[in-house]
Amino acid sequence: MKTKPTKRLLIFSAVYYAVFVILMVIGTFKDLEVSLALFNPESSFAVIAESFGQIVYWAMWGPALTVILLCRHDLYEILDFAMTHSKSARPFEIKNEKRFKIFNTLFKIIYFAVFFALAVIGWNKVIKNVTKNVLLLLDIENLSDLTYYIISVFAAALAVVIFSRIKPETLRRLEIGAVIGVFSGILFKCVEELKPLTERVRFREMVAYSNGYLNDSGMSEGRYSPLTSEMAGGADFSAFTPWYKKGDNMGIYSRADSFPSGHTCYSCALFLSYVYCCLFPKLKKAAPYALILSFVYTALMGYARIIAGAHYLTDVASAAIIGYTIFLAVRGAYMLLASKNILPKI
């Protein structure tokens, strides 16, 4: 993978940012009008996107952490790294070779245990989220957390067996994408955690409250209520605020965390497909298509969130910008460190 952005990536990025910045500007002045025009919570597309739209984010954790597990490093590599990159480091003499080997063995056991546990959590993320949403749509009782973790342990163990058959050189290439994916995913999650700070009331919560759909606490219940597009006509939107102002749930709206859109931000995880295409010579020709596919997926996810009434145009446009910027920043940071031989490069 080249250390500098390709001309194609630069052009794509310029177009991508231009599209979503323009949508951000339009939404700044027309957010409520756009939501009123597009609101269609009965749409199967909106329902499926809400339930499974984040699958590209859920599905990356298990494979990524399994790859990192199988590319495990030891104390010898750490010492070699320290000797190579520290100007003040002096030659390290291992006085007791047997003791060092024991420490190295313990280190590898701990490394394996920690990353296997993380891999289990990663596989659990996709298994649990997909299964519980399928069961929810079928109106079937959800499984217990313990059941999900038992299934995830077997899934992680099976993945280790299957992935261990991959050639070491291929695994090293996959490791690069895995590391970029993990750090991007962590930052995507950070964006999600900051959403409640904006306290922007979701469109469908105002529609739900106006039509008497309340939860057990007497607050609005937007997602799990049988809302229709016609209900928006007589709804009270006095709680609506533009994206640059802090909202107020007024003690009656259960979801005041509209800005930015988590689903849209998470959909940017699909841009990792571009990284993997660049890592393998046989896939490099598919890299431009990976970018286009990721762009279309992100745009469709944003559209689905608007018609569901879960987000406004500025919510999804800002999330698309933030998510893609995170991807580029993490990829760029990795490439910079790889160029300095701090991280492996291909």
Image (tube, grey):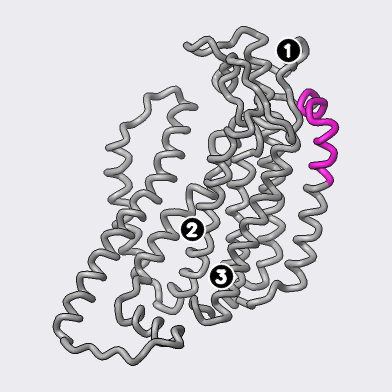
Q: Residues within 10 Å of mark 1 (few under 14, many from 20)?
A: some
Label drawn at residue 235: 1
Residue position marked by numbered label 2 in the rendering: 182
> What x and y, as percent, mark residue 320?
69, 47
Q: Which residues are magenta?
A: 22-36
Residue at point 65%, 25% (across, down): 201
Instruction: Please state which amino acid type lies under the numbered disc 2.
Output: Val
Spatial separation of the CA atoms under disc 2 and disc 1: 42 Å
Q: Element at badge 1?
A: loop
223 displayed left or right of 99: right
Instruction: Please state which amino acid type lies under the numbered disc 3.
Output: Tyr
Q: Earlier in the sequence, mark 1 or mark 3?
A: 1
157 displayed left or right of 18: left
Task: State whether the magenta stretch is mostly helix, strand or loop.
Answer: helix
Q: Is residue 123 magenta?
A: no
30 displayed left or right of 212: right
Residue 141: quarter of image = top left
> What x and y, as percent, mark residue 313?
75, 36
Residue position marked by numbered label 3 in the rendering: 334
Question: Exactly how many numbered labels are in the figure?
Answer: 3
Residue 42 visible from this viewpoint: no
Indicate the quadrant containing the N terminus: top left, top right, bottom left or bottom right.
Answer: bottom right
Instruction: Please state which amino acid type lies under the numbered disc 1.
Output: Ala
On screen, 172 above or below 272? below
On screen, 303 above or below 158? above
Q: Element at badge 3?
A: helix
Spatial separation of the CA atoms under disc 2 and disc 3: 12 Å
> What x and y, as percent, mark residue 177?
52, 66
Residue at point 51%, 82% (across, down): 341
> What x and y, as percent, mark residue 54?
55, 43
Asked whether the residues under the numbered discs 2 and 3 touch, taking CB atoms below 8 Å apart as contact, a structural biologist would say no
Q: Earlier in the sequence, mark 2 or mark 1?
A: 2
